[in-house]
Each structure stands twice: as C-alpha cells, then as structure tokens.
Amino acid sequence: MTYQSEPDERVPGVVTTQGSSYDTTEARPGRAFLARGTGRLTSRTWFVLLAGALLPAIVLAVWLIASAGGTTATLPSPGDVWLAGVDLAQRGLLASDVAISVQRVLLGFGIGAGLGLSIGAVVGLSKLGDILLSPTLAALRAVPSLAWVPLLILWFKIGEDSKVILIAIGAFFPVYTTVSAALRHVDRQLVEAGRAFGLNGPRLFVTVQLPAVIPSVISGLRLALAQAWLFLVAAELIASSMGLGFRLVDSQNNGRIDRIFFVIILLAVLGKLTDSLVGLFERWVKRRWS
Amino acid sequence: MSTTVPQALARDVSRAVSIDFAGVGRAFAPERGSGPARPVLRDIELAVEPGEVVAILGTSGCGKSTLLRITGGLDSATSGSVRIDGSPVSGIDPRTAIGFQEPRLLPWRTVHDNVALGLPRGTPKAEGAERVSTLIDLVGLSEFAGHRPREISGGMAQRTSLARALARNPGVLLLDEPFGALDALTRLKMQDLLLDILSAEPTTVLLVTHDVDEALQLADRIVLLAKPEDESAPGATIAQLLTVPGTRPRDRGSAELAELRGRLLDGLGIDRHGSARGVETGTSIPHYPY
C-alpha cells in the first residue's frame, strides 16, 4: 500500500517538546496526494456503490435472458418472483413471516449475545473461570447446530422457545469466543497502569478492559448476528408454521419455486441490511475507541 | 516554562513524605519446576528524606525496576519492608504515583481524560477538571488536551503520563526510566521540565535510570545497585551511595559532575578509557566528599 510510504508522524522525538511546533497539517498533503492518485476512483462513494451493484446487475441480466425461454417450473423469471412477492404481501403473509422471523432473530441474538458477553468476560478475566469453563464450552461448540434440534423440540415442543434457544446457541459462540480471547489479550501494561492508579475489580474492568475490547466485541456481535439468521432458517425449516424458513418449506411442498426465489432474495437483503447497520456502528466504535 | 507557581498548585502543594527501606530483598520463584528461588535484590537499606530526589542506577536486570515496583505496591518484597511516611507499604498505595517507561495512556481517551485518570478517588468534578488543566498547562500540553494519544508524539505522551502521575498529588513520585524511550535531545528537555515540575509540586522522587548523566542532573543522591563482583551472595544490593554536590539545575558540563560520572560508570562496569587521554584512571580532582 502507498500508506506505508507516508512518514510516521508519531516517531518520538521528531517533535520537539515545544508542543506548538507539532504540525498536524504536515501529514495532510500526503493523504491529499493519495486521494488524487491511486485512490482517486475507488474512494468515491458513487463509484463504490455503482461497482458493488455491478455483479447483481449482471446476474439479473443473465437471469432475465435464461428464464425468457424456460418454464416457470424450474427457473421463474425475475418478474414472476416479483409478482410472487407482491402476492405474498397482499395476502398479509409477507409481513407476518418477516415480523415473526425478525422477532426470533432479535430475541435469540439478544439472549445469546448477552450470555456470550458475560460468560466470555468470566473466562477472559479469571484464570479459574477459564480452567473451569473453557473445555466444556469448546466441546459444546463442536456440536453441529442441527444436532440440538431434536432435543430442543422434545424439551420445549414446537413453540417459540425451541427456535429462540437454537438461535441463541448460534449467537452465543461467536460472542463468547471473541470476547474471551480479546480480554485475555488486553495490554497487560495498560491494566497494570490502571491498577497503579488505584483501579481494581469492576472499576478496572469498566475503565480499562472493557473499552480495550469494545472493537472485538462489536466484531463478535456482527458475526453472531449473521449466525442468528443462519440458525433462524434452520429452526424454521424443521418445525414451524410461520416465518421465512417455513415459507421456504411450504413453497417447496407446493412447488412454488418463484416464492422460494423470493424468500431467498429477501433473506439476503435482510441479512445484508442488519449486517450493514452493525457495520456502521462498528466503524463508529472503532473510530471512538482506538 | 513559566517559573511562577500557579495558584491552584500552590494551594495543595503536596505532602512530600519519607521512604525507608529496611533489609528489602526480592527473590523470584523459579520459572518452572521446583528449583531454588532466584534472588534479585537483597539487603536494601536506605532512608529517603521527604522532598529528596534519589536516582537508582544500575545495569539492566539488576533489579532497579523491581525495587521501584515494590515501593509502589505493584510487587512485594520477599524479605524486609518498605515504609512510606512510617507506615508499611502493602499493595497499591494512594500516596505514591508511578510514571512508567512507556506512557501507557488509554488510547481511547483524550490527553485531558488520561490525566484525569490519576486524580485521587472522590475528587469533586470541578476541582478535578481544574487540577487536570493546571497540570496539562504545567507540562505544556494545553493545546493538545483534546487530542488522542495516537495524535501526539512520544515526548508529549510521556509528558501526559507525568501529568497523570502528578494528578494523584503523590507524596512519593516513582519514575521508572521515564525518559528512556525518548531521543537524546527530547530527554534533556524532559529532564529540565521535570525540575520545573518539582519546583512547582515538591515531592519525594525515586527515579530509576540507566543514564548516569540523567541521575547527576536530577538527583540529590544516587544509589548504585550492583551484584558483588566475587559472586559471594546472589542478588544486587546498594554498591555505592553518592550525594550529588550543588543545587539543581546543575551545569551539565561541570568538572565535579564529570568526576562523579567517571566513578559511577566505573561502578557500572564501564571502562572510562581515561588512560587513552593520558589521564590516570584515578581522581583528577580531590576525592569526593570535597
């Protein structure tokens, strides 16, 4: 990267102890040059948006051409898929499917992420917690997600509980893993400095350790949210009477391939949308906390 | 740097206190297995007067930082005791503040908020803010109070760290090679700054350094830690205790200091190469004390 050729403004001693002589403007020409040079096109917002939409546009075009001659039974045209969506919306099924699925994702994600944060904190901060808990959790993590389904259905029946719990299991592990690992690797020197200034226990955690791991926590949450959507569809595919996963099975049974296409596209859009929201939050957090 | 003492500082001019080391020793447990403990320090006997600046010199690995950490309560002695103002040190002591070799600033906090971390627990908010800005003024960083550590130079970060230690209003200021990571010129300026600060905020100072000139420039007395040459007993102890003549700030080029420098370098096992200039390795001016 061209970035590497920029002078390191933080080299100690390049700056004199006369604070005022530190010149922040000095580094700017380099970046301006970068913006005019290699990064010119790829740093423009319109170009990024347009280029990102290029591949979907090509896929859509190929799809249009391919479906033009075929039958709706194997490959519905984009128009058919759109109409299937409109039809679902008019019947009121679309709103209820999306609502129940989003509700399950948010509930499961909230519970799983909350547990992941707290247990991750215990394992990351306490040696004893690490020794006691991490082997068991590592073993549980190795269990394939679908293996839980029969047990959950027997225990919690085919209700909301079993689905939310499955999603919570999916959201738990990314958060738990990233939080415990990040806490273990918090700069020891910073922690010691915190202790030297009289901080300990919860105050030390809130002042030093938590802010230090916030960027990793957000990355973990982002992964967990993606996992939550995966587990949602798994849960709904197997046993449900509502939701996007149920709509997939239902459409499969009725041979409504247009609806299957529609739901898959909808899942992609919903997943990308929630991920982007967390991504924006992540960017803000990284600027704020590092 | 202005020589007038700001009002806010004059008001709570600190309570410099004494430090007494009585037979302090520290042995580290063997890395693995059950070998014999490895002694690093032994039989440290030293009385530091309130308001005195004592430099601890020694080769690397001789235990000078360990001695400082024991004084600050970050480590504990395996034998003997350290008393601050007559009461023994156990754990982090609110009367001491530490300046580390690295600035150890919280990267997500501004310079101002990093200094505020040093304020004693329960300082009223307004009073704390006032004290922090006075200290930031004192170290010449008022223009940078809102900057993050990554936006300032190494020297400025070290000044922030010094201000943070002073925010604690310490009776004993412990400095662990505070300028060791800075370039030579910045280091000299920081030494002068430290002297200015000490005249504004008198306190007892233990300064660990490997820089003989720094010790001569800043200290009232210099402790030279060394292991006995004949290896009769393991662990370093006080090999020399020198009183530095004159008052600070001292003439960096004075002949008296040159003589002391020679003796200290000798004690550190550095060849003075005096004979190369046709000078006996002995004394060129009458033996200290004069």
Image (cartoon, rainbow, N blue to C red):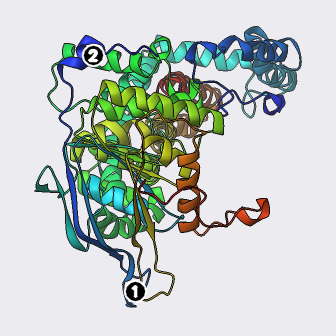
Mark linked to residue B233: 1
The answer to whether residue A4 is visible is yes
Seen in the picture, residue B286 relative to B132 is either above or below; the reply is: below
Q: Residue at x 63, y 24 (%)?
A: A16
Would you identify the image quadrant in which residue B6 lies? top left
* Secondary structure under the numbered disc 1 in the rendered image: loop
* Secondary structure under the numbered disc 2 in the rendered image: helix
Front residue of A8 and B232: B232
Relative to B272, is B237 on the left or the right?
Answer: left
Q: Residue at x 42, y 31 (%)?
A: B195
Relative to B95, is B174 on the left or the right?
Answer: right
Would you identify the image quadrant in which residue B38 lies? bottom left
Q: Chain of mark 1?
A: B
Q: Which residue is mark 2?
A: B129
Front residue of A25 and A80: A25
Q: Looking at the picture, how far across and down is residue A19, in whole percent? A: 56, 17
Q: Disc 2 residue type?
A: Ala
Q: Disc 1 residue type?
A: Ala
Front residue of A33 and B254: B254
Relative to B32, is B271 on the left or the right?
Answer: right
Single out the residue that lies furthest toward the left: B87
Seen in the picture, residue A178 relative to A214 is either above or below; the reply is: below
Q: Looking at the picture, how far across and down is residue A75, in whole percent? A: 75, 30
Sequence-wise first label, 2 or 1:
2
